[in-house]
Amino acid sequence: MPKPATLPVLDWKAIYQSGVTFNQWLRRKESPENCKAMRKLLAEQDIEAQEGALLTGLPRKVHVVIIAEDWCGDVVQHVPVLERLAKETPKLQTRYITREQHPDVFVRFLTNGGEAIPKFIFLSDQYVECGNWGPMPKDCRKLIARGKACGDVGAARQKVAAMYEADSDRRVVVTELLELIQTAVCKQP
């Protein structure tokens, strides 16, 4: 019986180090109005006291590789949440890469076989992949998948938009990202 194909091992440390910071990424500006919107959302994003305490108490670093482009609406919604969490502690460090820069990375993180951004790849302090998030919260991804399955992605996107509006402070995103951060710093399974 033939062996299944094996994906090459990625050098996550090198990939992370090839990325740019949030501010460097914003300066590239494909969409100046979206960059302005992200800065506004970042400034407005609330972090609750217990979330801040969790972040300031992280026992070690978490590295996050972000695949994002500023023209994308989901990027505008979700990147500021991650960056707001990162502002709470120097132990949460982010770097941005492009799809073109690392196609070998991006192809591993397709959403239901399709290209969708943003993608946040969480790495431990030793640059071990611990999980990923994106392009939207889990329940929204389910809606899009159901829309694809029944041939009505438009209706699914309308429901996702309504979910975004109902969760305008992006609490669901905060919760899902904090779970991944906790996984990346865990001391035992």
Image (cartoon, grey):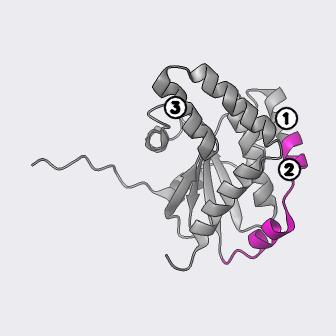
Q: Nearer the viewer, residue 16 or 114?
A: 114
Query: Residue 37 got which mark?
Result: 1
Could you tell me which secondary element the residue under label 2 belongs to? loop
Separation of residues labelled 3 and 1 (CA atoms): 30 Å
Question: Which label's residue is closer to the chain start, 3 or 1?
Answer: 1
Between disc 2 and disc 3, the foreground one is 3
Horizontally, residue 125 falls left or right of residue 25, namely left
Residue found at x 61% / y 61%: 180
Q: Nearer the viewer, residue 143 or 76?
A: 143
Extent of the magenta region = 40-59
Question: Which label's residue is closer to the chain start, 1 or 2?
Answer: 1
Could you tell me which secondary element the residue under label 3 belongs to? helix
Where on the picture, by quarter, is residue 122?
A: bottom right
Where on the picture, by quarter, is residue 53?
A: bottom right
Q: Amino acid at mark 3?
A: Arg
Question: Which label's residue is closer to the chain start, 2 or 3?
Answer: 2
Q: Would you call the spot at circle 1 few (<14 residues within 10 Å), some (14-19), or many (20 or more)?
A: some
**x%, y% of residue 170?**
77, 47
Instruction: Provide the residue designation for mark 3.
Output: 146
